[in-house]
Image (tube, grey):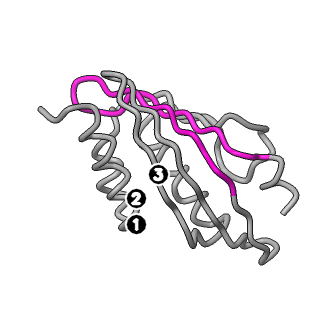
Amino acid sequence: MDTPMEVVKRAYQAFGRNDIEAVLECIAPTVDWRVVGPASLPFPTQCNTRQEVGQFFKAVAADGEITVFEPREFIDANEHIVVLGFVRVILSETGKPFESEWVHVCTVKDGLLTRWIEFFDTAARLTA
């Protein structure tokens, strides 16, 4: 069985290739998938199933074109992996760029992601 770090890196590599099906294969059927921010974000801020996470990715893609997505540091804490990174997006609604550093907190159990929580500058996103 893959280590938690290997599972998380595999998911991020798949996202980098825009292979959402491969990302979803890394996620448990029941998951705690959250974006910490206001409900006014144009994508779900809470998902509880792999299928809902699939809808999350569709909504994120509709929100804008991700021009830069960089996981920059992976911090290993056994079954918990913290990922620090950066994103730049051209927003569909306004055509304006938005960028932010981000933090993702992941938990892996039995070889699957069971928790993913994102923190980023949501105020900057909503005003772009």
The type of residue carrying mark 1 is Asn
Q: Residue at x 32, y 28 (%)?
A: 108
- Alpha carbon of mark 1 to alpha carbon of mark 2: how far? 5 Å
Determine which of the numbered discs, if any, sits on residue 103 in the image. Answer: none
- Alpha carbon of mark 3 to alpha carbon of mark 1: how far? 18 Å
Q: In the structure shown, which secondary structural element does the residue marked by tag 1 occupy?
A: loop
Image position of 89 (left or right of 94): left
**Magenta-drawn stretch contains 61:** no
| Residue 92 percent location from the top left of the image | 72, 73
| In contact (CB < 8 Å): disc 1 and disc 2 | yes
Q: Earlier in the sequence, mark 3 or mark 2?
A: 2
| Residue 21 percent location from the top left of the image | 33, 57
Q: Is residue 92 above or below residue 85?
A: below
Q: In the structure shown, which secondary structural element does the residue marked by tag 2 occupy?
A: helix
Determine which of the numbered discs, if any, sits on residue 15 in the image. Answer: 2
The type of residue carrying mark 2 is Phe
Image position of 78 (left or right of 124): left
- Which of the 4 image quadrants contains residue 115? top left
- Residue at numbered disc 3: 72
Q: Residue at x 82, y 74 (%)?
A: 94
**Magenta-drawn stretch contains 116:** yes
Q: Nearer the viewer, residue 6 or 14?
A: 6
Query: Residue at the left extreme?
Result: 1
Residue neighbourhood size for the residue with mark 2, other residues' Cα within 10 Å, grouped as few (<14), some (14–19), many (≥20): some
Q: Is residue 127 above or below residue 39?
A: below
The boundaries of the magenta stretch are: 100-122
